[in-house]
Image (spheres, rainbow, N blue to C red):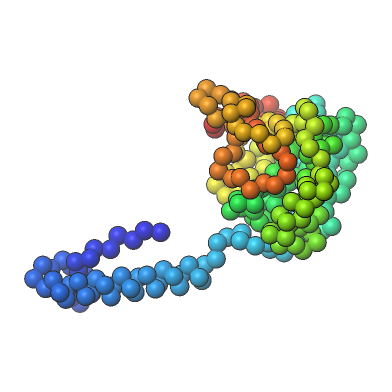
Amino acid sequence: MRLNVKPIIIRNGDYLYARKSQPRLIAMRAIVLAVILGTALRIEAQASPQPYSQIVSIDEYLMEDKAAEVSMARSAAPEAISRDAAVLVFGKRGYETAVEGKNGFTCLVERSWMNPFDSSGFWNPKMRGPICYNPAAVRTILPYTLNRTKLVVTGLSKEQIRESIVAAIAKNELPMPEVGAMSYMMSKSGNLGVGVGPWCPHLMFHVPKTDAASWGADLEGSPVLFDDQHHDAPEPETIFMVPVSNWSDGTSAPHQH
C-alpha cells in the first residue's frame, strides 16, 4: 500500500496546505505525521490478516448438492469422454466414488489445497477446479490429490502436509508420472481463484520433474505454458498447460494466453 504524503504541510483548521516560511516546524510536523501513519499501517496490517492464510471449517469446502458436483466434475472434459468416466465427489472424509466409470478416466472437482504451497489461495474455500484425468494420470497423478486431501481432512497444518508429502516421496510412496499422463480442464463453471474465474480451457500434461525449456514452454509463439510464479509443489511432477479454443461444451472461449 502506498500513500502520497506531502512532507511540507501544516494544518490550519481543517485544511492542509504548503508553507515555506516555517521549515523547522514543517519538518517536525512531517516527522510526526510519518510516525502516526506508520503506526496506523502496522495496526491495520495486524488487524487484517491475509485472506486464506489458514484453513476454514471443512464444511465450507463442501458442495451441498452432490449432483451439481458430479455435473461440474464432468464439465472438465468433452461429453464423449466424461459421460463414461468415473466421478469422485468431496466429503468430510475425503473423496468418494459417486459414479463408477467405464473408460478408465476419472473426473472430480479439485479444492484449493491442490495449489502450490506458495500460492496465496492455498486455503481458498471458494476455489473449484473441475479436472478429468486420463487412465495414465488416474494411476499416477490422481494419488497426489487423494493423498493431499487425506492429510487435509485429518486436520494437519499446511506445513505438516508438506512435510508429510516430502517424507512419502523419500519412501517412494507416491508414484512418478506415467508416460502419457494428462488431464482436461475445459470447464467454464469452475473457479480457479480470486480474479481468475474459470481462466481458459486447457489441457495439462504431467511429466517427471523437468524445466520449462524441455518443452519450449513460455517461448514466443509457443502454445505451451508453465507456471513459473509458484515453485513449492513437492510432488515429483512438472505440469505443462496447453490452452485450447473451446470449452468442454463446444462453445468458443476468450483467448487468454
* Residue 252 in view (yes/no): no
Q: Which quarter of the image is occupied by the C terminus?
A: top right
Where 191 sits versus 37, above or below? above
Q: Position of residue 130 (x, y in %)?
A: 72, 41
> Is residue 43 left or right of 184 when viewed as pictured?
left
User: Residue at image x 21%, y 75%?
Assistant: 28
Where 22 sits versus 149, above or below? below
> Is residue 251 left or right of 9 when viewed as pictured?
right
Front-lying residue, 239 or 243: 239
User: Residue at image x 62%, y 33%?
Assistant: 211
Which quadrant of the figure has residue 37?
bottom left
Q: Position of residue 30 (x, y in %)?
A: 24, 71
Tally the numbered discs.
0
Q: Residue furthest front?
A: 170
Q: Residue furthest left?
A: 21
Q: Position of residue 194 (x, y in %)?
A: 57, 50
User: Residue at image x 65%, y 62%?
Assistant: 54
Q: Which quarter of the image is occupied by the N terminus?
A: bottom left
Front-lying residue, 236 or 97: 236
